[in-house]
Amino acid sequence: MRIGLLTEGGYPYVSGEPGLWCDRLVRGLEQHEFDVYALARSERQEAEGWVTLPPQVGRVRTASLWDAEGDGVVYGRRTRRRFAECYGELAASLCASAPVGASGIAEATAPRAEGTGTHDQSAHEADRFANALYGLAELARDEGGLPRALRSETAVRALERACRAPGAHRSAREARVPDLLTVAARLERALRPLSLDWYGDDGLGAVDLCHAASGGTAALPGLLARHFCGVPLLVTEYGVRLRAHYLTEPDSSPPIRFLLAAFHGRLAAETYRSAALITPGNTHARRWQERCGAERAKLRTVHPGMDAAPFAEAGESPECADPHTLVWVGRVEPAKDLVSLLHAFAEIRRAEPKARLRIVGGPSGPEGAAYLAHCRNLAAQLFPDEADGPHAVGSNPVSFEETGGPELPTRAEAYASGALVVLSSVVEGFPAGLVEAMFCGRATVSTDVGAVVEAIGGTGLVVPPRNPRALAEACVALLRDPERRARLGAAARARALELFTVEQNVAAFHGIYLDILSRTPARRVVLDDSGEPLPFSVPAEAHVPGRWTDAKVRAVARGGPAWATDTPVRATAARSSENDGVAGSGGPGGPGGPGASKSATGGGREAVPAVVPAAVAERAGAAVPVSAVEGVRTVRPVSAVEGARTAVPVSAGEGAGAAGPVSATEGPRATASVSATEGPRATASVSVTEGVR
């Protein structure tokens, strides 16, 4: 099959965050063909280039989210009015969102109880957002792009009107002009995929499945491919985009945070609604997705696949570790809370004077560099250089290092150097560093954040975050008990090899691809090199007529199959030589009685004249012509009077073959003209059968 892999700031760029697992997935599924559609976040990322691509990657198309080049499209009056309407509806759906609750999650995105006014309002706003989003996409397709319009004064004024409209949320009404300009610029960047030319038959319309490597803007091309071309969408999230927004926007003004949170929440809800399946990487991400409106039936947890080969040597030789050394490995940033780790290590040194701490990792951006400098100063204050004697050079028990040098060439060497691996984060998604330590067979002490407990699963010690004393006590307990460390390390390695390898990840996605495609009708004809249709490229089921392939939807009678709405087949009349009886009656003219004649349809059933007026029996409704087969009787009441007795001309009475106007007796049900096939008793005039509808 042909997969369209959608990424943002990741694969195939060298500095992409989710690039590693995407590269492993593509290389592991060599039987499939991949088209990569990548969004670049910065000029530096584009300048660093791509990773080496495997042969199954057929094409790569990229677009930038960092530049602000104009599209050169000038709109006419009618187009500007159309844009203002769509953008105004989009902004109004954001301003009408419910307030952000104490949990930090927009309550508008959370599912509501059915039948409540709040749920109806939330569903209305979700539909309003989706209609506005797809309206902007159709406008971009018709006019050639939207970047200039999204940065125009029309967009800012539409956003301002939505914020000042009656019923808008208080945080939206407090927005000032600088806030509106900032929000409009951020929305233009997030909606930039609407203007791309990826959604034709030579782009995403030609793939069998779109696989978004993250939510948010990366999933937006998948939504449009589904909207324009009917391509199914699979969404994989190892870190929920809405959660990342709350973590990365702490310093913005309340109106900016509210409007952007509402946009990301609405976009996440629409993505989850449209996706065929959603694959969170852990239970922590799954809970966020359910809170944002994802249906539980669509969720299927797939743990990230990591390469265990580089850590095999360290895992098979745990005796090489220094029994007094603690190791921390990761990116240096405030969320890792190294300050608490240093204070905890001060208490560890009081209990275990031989203990040493190795902090391995580089800073993450300018903020990380400043935080690293602060941690170095704190370590120098807490642990002055110590010397073994009066003529020896002192050394600090805390060292700050980076991988790639002669002492620590790889991360595996860093984990192997210590007997205990420590994680002190206050914010964490999926702890990839802990899983690497588990591959190395090391016992771990970590804080209870994110998916830490799910990852270690009882093979390590967990303490509350921002609690240096608890962290120190757990570390001292394991440093003093080498047998317990060995047991926990062996169990951790076994768990990691079972759940977090590349092989299990690739096998899981291979099954998911086949599952989605098996439930998706074929949409296109595959051509060979000469341009001719490729034989057997489309499954035979795609040609079977039925409700799943018909362009129009037909009304189906309640309780009956689809063909029950077809025009009824008229029965062939076969009169007896005497007074004809009614099929099913016990009179002389009934079946098996004297004078009964055989019907042309066979089966020994008597066919009666085709269409005559029907009677409405007591406590029964009138019936319209329908089809009937063996064992199925379908009626569609159109008008009925409760308890009324209506006398109309019929051709048969109870137990008699006399023809003439009689009144329907109580008990039988009157059935209008039906078609008769072999098996059921079908009456064309009025068949009066005791106790049978």
Image (cartoon, helix red, strand yellow):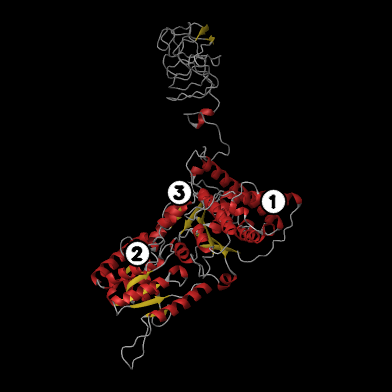
Q: Quadrant of residue 437?
A: bottom left
Looking at the rendered structure, the secondary structure element under dot 3 is helix
Question: Which residue matches tag 1?
Answer: 84
User: Which residue is label 2 attached to?
Assistant: 463
Residues under labels 1 and 2: Cα distance? 53 Å
- For this view, does 450 lie left or right of residue 68? left
Q: Nearer the viewer, residue 657 or 505?
A: 505
N-terminal of the two: label 1 or label 2? 1
Q: Few, some or many C-alpha atoms within 10 Å of disc 1 (few <14, some 14-19, many ≥20)?
A: many
Q: Are marks 3 and 1 in contact (CB under 8 Å)?
A: no
Quarter of the image holding residue 285? bottom left
- Observer able to see residue 529: no
Dot 2 or dot 3: first in sequence order is 3
Query: Could you tell me if residue 368 is visible in this image?
Result: yes
Of pointers 3 and 1, the one earlier in the residue sequence = 1
Looking at the image, residue 218 lies above or below residue 355:
above
Residue at (28, 75) in percent of width and height: 351
Q: Amino acid at mark 3?
A: Lys
**Which quarter shows the C terminus?**
top left
- Could you tell me residue 616's position as x and y percent? 52, 15
Looking at the picture, which amino acid does disc 1 mark?
Ala
Cα–Cα span, label 3 and label 1: 35 Å
Mark 2 surroundings: few (<14), some (14-19) or many (≥20) residues within 10 A: many
Q: Is residue 673 above or below residue 123?
A: above
User: Mark 3 = which residue?
Assistant: 298
